[in-house]
Amino acid sequence: MTSSEDRPPFEPPYTDHEYEGIPMTGMVPKESLDAMKTFEMRDGDVVVLSYPKSGTNWMHQIVHEILGGKPETALPKTLEFFYLHVGQVQPVYAQLQQAPSPRLIWTHLPFQLAPPGLSTPINKVKVIVILRNPKDVSVSYCYFRQNFQFTTSPESWEQHAKDFLDGTLVYGDYFDHVLGWWQRKDDPHFLFVKYEDMKKDFPSWVKTMAAFLEKELTDEDLARVFTNCSMESIRKTLAGTIRKDIVRKGIVGDWKDHYSTEESAKLDQKYRERMAGSGLEFEFE
């Protein structure tokens, strides 16, 4: 596997494009997305999956620590190598095909673009889906668009709020994405975890995830997870990487400092319409 020193850095800005009706960043080329149709999952694969800005880095660090904190699954390394569908000099999916098992993989792919062995897993593939309320996702996504050149930057907060509401951001409509994966809620290969629930009772959710991953954690292991998965610790972990500024406040309810009454009401209406009958609800503060 190529080392980070041997490979050139990212070369933004990227031009967004559309793939099978889904807006995508230019750092995810058509060839990589085409390859997902035949990408093979393996027994022992663990996948962290989310809509962008839902707590992916936090969840990845938690899973990494639960699995033993091995260097090959550490956050900086997987940011470069194990982001399933991103394409650089050598597409990541090609590197993953060469990587030894067990593999810790993460992705933002919507349900309809995922490899068959991920959308409908068999055998010992395990998928943890991290979900977050749409308003806080939207705010975090706006800062991401402003601070990184992986996708088009918004002209203003107001324009971003409209883009999010209209479902035109990279990786598509939030509700389409979340509900697409939510149809697997009763599949034993999947564990759905809400960001807000983890913020309220982190120890219980760590134990739930460990049980799902069939890992027994000692008190010492739990202490390591709690220490290494704090927001401050993750900031230090990402320092010096291309994603060093990606972790912001990490709180619930930050949207209240950004959304106007009218913007909030419009998103509330869409939330009610799209979530009706799904059994999926979020806390917003």
Image: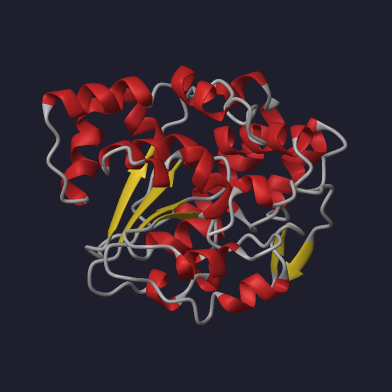
Farthest right residue?
A: 155
Please report the residue visible at 25 percent of the width from the left and 35 percent of the height from the top: 205
Residue 218 left/right relative to 151: left
Residue 15 left/right relative to 265: right
Please report the residue visible at 65 percent of the width from the left and 18 percent of the height from the top: 257
Q: In this view, does 152 lie above or below 185?
A: above
Which of 213 and 218 lies nearest the eye of the viewer? 218
- Total numbered circles: 0
Which x, y percent locates residue 118? 40, 69
* Rendered image quadrant of residue 26: bottom right
Q: Is residue 268 above or below residue 174?
A: above
Which x, y percent locates residue 146? 78, 34
Which of 191 and 277 lies nearest the eye of the viewer? 191
Farthest bottom residue?
A: 38
Residue 92 left/right relative to 213: right
Is residue 282 in view?
no
Which of 221 and 266 lies nearest the eye of the viewer? 221
